[in-house]
Image (cartoon, grey):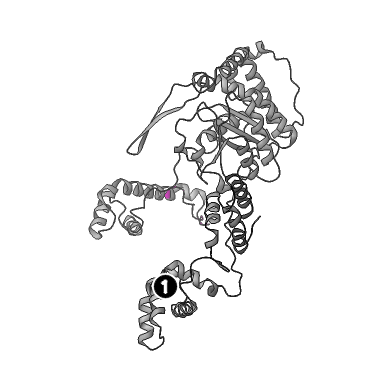
């Protein structure tokens, strides 16, 4: 309950006399009631009730007396208008010069007290006194602080901020399976990569939607061999939204984002997008529930094959020497091996990893991956419309085929071979300015009039005639140009069309000539 100052003073006068005449126990009870009604601090209430008879009556607005009266405010408005309505920080140092100038020309006459107050006024006070004048007719309410956006609540983390984190800090990203087009709906892959170990998880999403992203992350938290401690995403709307932000806060997961247009801030997950997702699935367009189910099935085998049987490099350090960067790597190791060696993974999790590793057959996983790759390629080509049933794998036949599989070239059906019809290694652009661009017409005239001259003679003549860009080092270039010109002239002479034969020349006459 909030009461006015006048009511509090009246309450103090009414209770003070009874408080001073009461015993100790009664004083405590009176003090409790008084504090509850008036809202004072207990010590302050004791002081008021002890000296209650000497409290003067104060009615009206409390606070210090007004320093700058209406005359000062009106003079300030005139000076502000004369200064072309500049802000208080700029008006404050101008006031001495402006006042003296206006008084010297007879435009202004100030009282000495008003002048003194104007000259000692601060910039904040100037802006406060001018606020009603700056915005006439508008309500002068409190300025509401703008609430931060969702993007502003997520801190930025760069590629240099990771250091050596514990297992559980993961980068996340979406891979679009649109076949090079963003028109319509198509399947996406959510990729999560652990920074410390390289452990990678892939989840298929039938559409790009924030609630599906949150659901996939929540489901993966129980299947990974370490607790999820942090996630780092790009600035896409599927990640930067209040749904994922609220989920991370409730789950106590650190949520950060990369800098816009800086893909190297997410180098770990970007590398897995190519080495895992694109390598396994390819670049074809996949749409609908059937394609999403096919991706989910291939990722069941991929996560085990990649995390338990695919060693990868991890950067130890790098050193820049001039323009060259020398990198030093740890020995290649699988994500499972790194987790087993980590001191931040519990023994129970390590035992589960060892138990899973003993039961896994890499050949069975690879055969399932190859089968689903052929099916995904058929889905992308429009040749299939359902997911094939699981079959009893004939691993002996698959094992026998591995010895001759290299003869067929690429075995992944989802792989897109490079176009070998285009020439490679042929440079068709200039790397520097042509030194003979301005003088070549002159050289052509010399060649036509003196075709027996050498390129060296032409170069010496050019260097004598002008001090342009032609130098001694350009001799080989000029020799090639002259050689090409002579070759073109020779071809023109050899393949010149025959002139029309005169009618008086018969074949026998031509033969005897």
Depth order, front residue of 110/181: 110
Which residue is drawn at the image coordinates 71% and 33% (left, top)?
A: 292
Depth order, front residue of 363/494: 363
In this rendering, is residue 230 above or below 338? below
Depth order, front residue of 103/28: 28
**Secondary-structure class at tag 1:** helix
Residue 478 % position (x, y): 32, 49
- Residue 512 visible in the snapshot: yes
In this rendering, is residue 68 above or below 392? below
- Density class for disc 1 (Cα within 10 Å; few <14, some 14-19, many ≥20) is many
Residue 352 % position (x, y): 60, 16
Which residue is drawn at the image coordinates 60% and 21% (left, top)?
A: 305
Depth order, front residue of 403/161: 161
On the image, numbered disc 1 is attached to which residue? 91
Location of the N terminus by quadrant is bottom right
Q: Main secondary structure of the magenta part?
A: loop
Residue 454 % position (x, y): 28, 49
Which residue is drawn at the image coordinates 52% and 50% (left, top)?
A: 43
Please state the extent of the stretch shown in magenta in the rendering: 493-504
Which residue is drawn at the image coordinates 52% and 42% (left, top)?
A: 258
Task: Place residue 10 in its image quadrant.
Answer: bottom right
Residue reaching furthest bottom?
A: 106
Residue 431 % position (x, y): 39, 47
Q: Is residue 41 magenta?
A: no
Q: Is residue 500 magenta?
A: yes
- Residue 284 visible in the snapshot: no
Horizontal relation, residue 132 to residue 387: left or right: left
């Amino acid at each position: 309950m909030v009461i006015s100052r006048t009511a509090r003073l009246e309450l103090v006068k009414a209770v003070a006399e009874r408080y001073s005449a009461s015993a100790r126990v009664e004083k405590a009870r009176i003090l409790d009631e008084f504090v509850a009604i008036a809202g004072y601090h207990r010590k302050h209430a004791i002081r008021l009730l002890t000296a209650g008879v000497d409290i003067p009556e104060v009615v009206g607005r409390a606070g210090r007396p007004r320093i700058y009266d209406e005359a000062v405010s009106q003079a300030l408005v005139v000076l502000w208008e004369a200064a072309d309505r500049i802000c208080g920080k700029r008006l404050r140092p101008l006031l001495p010069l402006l006042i003296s100038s206006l008084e010297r020309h007879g435009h202004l006459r100030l009282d000495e007290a008003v002048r003194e107050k104007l000259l000692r006024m601060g910039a904040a006070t100037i802006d406060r006194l001018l606020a009603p004048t700056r915005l006439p007719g508008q309500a002068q309410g409190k300025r509401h602080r703008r609430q931060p956006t969702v993007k502003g609540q997520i801190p930025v983390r760069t590629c240099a901020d990771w250091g050596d984190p514990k297992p559980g800090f993961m980068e996340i990203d979406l891979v679009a399976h649109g076949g090079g087009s963003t028109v319509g709906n198509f399947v996406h892959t959510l990729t999560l990569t652990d920074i410390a170990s390289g452990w990678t998880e892939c989840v298929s999403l039938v559409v790009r939607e924030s609630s599906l992203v949150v659901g996939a992350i929540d489901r993966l938290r129980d299947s990974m061999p370490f607790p999820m401690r942090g996630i780092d995403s790009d600035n896409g709307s599927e990640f930067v939204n209040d749904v994922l932000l609220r989920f991370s806060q409730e789950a106590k997961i650190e949520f950060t984002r990369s800098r816009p247009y800086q893909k190297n801030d997410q180098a770990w997950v970007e590398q897995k997008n190519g080495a895992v997702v694109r390598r396994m699935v390819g670049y074809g367009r996949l749409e609908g529930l059937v394609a999403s189910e096919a991706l989910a099935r291939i990722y069941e085998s991929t996560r085990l094959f990649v995390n338990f049987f695919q060693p990868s490099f991890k950067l130890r350090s790098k050193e820049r020497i001039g323009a060259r960067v020398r990198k030093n790597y740890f020995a290649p190791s699988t994500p499972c091996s790194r987790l087993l060696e980590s001191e931040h993974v519990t023994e129970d999790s390590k035992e589960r990893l060892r138990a899973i590793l003993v039961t896994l057959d890499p050949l069975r996983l690879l055969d399932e991956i190859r089968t689903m790759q052929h099916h995904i390629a058929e889905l992308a080509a429009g040749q299939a419309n359902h997911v094939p049933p699981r079959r009893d794998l004939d691993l002996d036949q698959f094992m026998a085929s591995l010895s001759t599989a290299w003869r067929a070239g690429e075995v992944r059906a989802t792989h897109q071979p490079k176009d070998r019809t285009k020439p490679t290694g042929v440079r068709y652009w200039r790397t520097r300015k042509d030194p003979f661009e301005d003088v070549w017409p002159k050289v052509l005239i010399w060649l036509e009039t003196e075709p027996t001259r050498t390129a060296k003679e032409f170069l010496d003549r050019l260097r004598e005639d002008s001090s342009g860009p032609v130098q001694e080092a350009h001799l080989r270039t000029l020799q090639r140009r002259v050689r090409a010109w002579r070759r073109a002239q020779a071809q023109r002479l050899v393949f010149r069309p025959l002139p029309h034969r005169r009618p008086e020349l018969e074949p026998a006459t031509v033969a005897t000539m």
